[in-house]
Amino acid sequence: MNKKIALAILTALAGTIGTAHAQSAQTPASPSAPASQDPLGPLKHVHAGVLDVAYAELGPANGPVVILLHGWPYDIHSYEEVAPALAAKGYRVLIPYARGYGGTRFLSADTLRNAEPAALGQDVIDFMDALHIRRAVFGGFDWGARSADIVAALWPERVKALVSVSGYLIGSQEAGKTPLLPEAEYQWWYQFYFATDRGRLGYEKNHHDFAKLIWRNASPKWNFDDATYERSAQAFENPDHVAITVHNYRWRLNLANGEAKYDALEKKLAQGPKIAVPTITLEGDANGAPHPQPAAYAKQFTGKYEFRLITGGIGHNLPEEAPEAFTKAIVDADRL
């Protein structure tokens, strides 16, 4: 091979390699991209109570603490715009994965995969204790709003202020025995589905598509893309996710037992305790999930209180659908 031909071949190869490198550098990150590319940053872990809790942390370590709690079937990325915005305002923002989600794991294989409300509330207190946090501003929606309500009601000294989507969500097994009007019962179809063996098997087999259906029904005007859903859906691959989901809804119908160590807390919650901490409740104007009317729960908040209706086709996943409104509510509640 003469030198001119060899040089031409090498030049062509170099150009091909350079082009391939340029194309790969512009390829969008896949759902399995390294955690460092996540807007919430790499996760941290802490042993708290019965859990090894995976959580995101943003903002200055010495800033006032905000704890944001996600719901079902969602994950910490519901706050992917809220958390950086609060961190930019000087808050230390913590977003833990609940039991049965993401990287959070039970420390013992022998622990009951229990999702009764008191257990989820206690998890939050254990998380705060593990991180030596005395007091925080809380924000939550769906299961997360219920847990935030519980902490505010039973441990008010730990809560500086509260933002709760859909307001007062504390309930009990006794309350769950009361039938609703047919249209309202219809909205809870998945709860009755989970009450059956077929439902548990169905969710185990189809939880990816099942959760996506819930997203669409709960937020009918939110045009989320596949990448947005897939990022959160990874959290549902937690080995305890199905057990936690099913137990939570069966417990509500008194079809599953909790643990005796939470009985005293559940007894207090069954009395419908008032919430006296400064609170802002939010509701989206297009929330397709079951939710109480604001007038029905306003009396449960006895301290400084404000209700805000967020318009523009906002559904159930309010922090992700209306991050500016949710961020403002956190800051405003902190100042009440």
Image: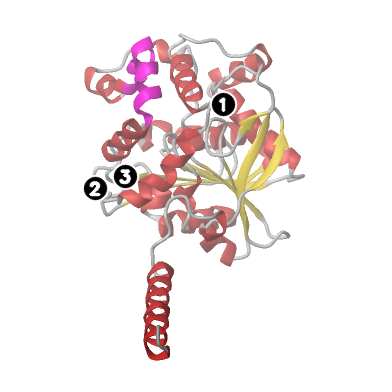
Q: Amino acid at mark 3?
A: Gly
Give the color scheme: rainbow, by chain, secondary structure or one colour. Answer: secondary structure
Mark 1: which secondary structure?
loop
Q: Amino acid at mark 2?
A: Lys
Query: What residue is shown at x 29% (from left), y 42% (from top)?
Result: 219
Q: Nearer the viewer, residue 336 or 116?
A: 116
- Residue 315 badge: 3
- Residue 323 badge: none
Q: Nearer the viewer, mark 1 or mark 2?
A: 2
Quadrant of the image containing the C terminus: bottom right
- Residue 273 badge: 1
Up/down of 192 relative to 25, above or below = above
Neighbourhood count class around disc 1 (C-alpha, 10 Å): few under 14, some 14–19, many 20 upward = some
Q: Nearer the viewer, residue 92 or 73?
A: 73
Residue 286, percent across and down?
27, 44
Mark 3: which secondary structure?
loop
Residue stretch in magenta: 190-207
Residue 179, percent across and down?
33, 12
Query: What residue is shown at x 64% (from left), y 20% (from top)?
Result: 265
- Residue 221 badge: 2
Q: Amino acid at mark 1?
A: Pro
Q: Nearer the viewer, mark 3 or mark 1?
A: 3
Query: What residue is shown at x 58% (from left), y 54% (from top)?
Result: 334
Q: Is residue 50 left or right of residue 330?
A: right
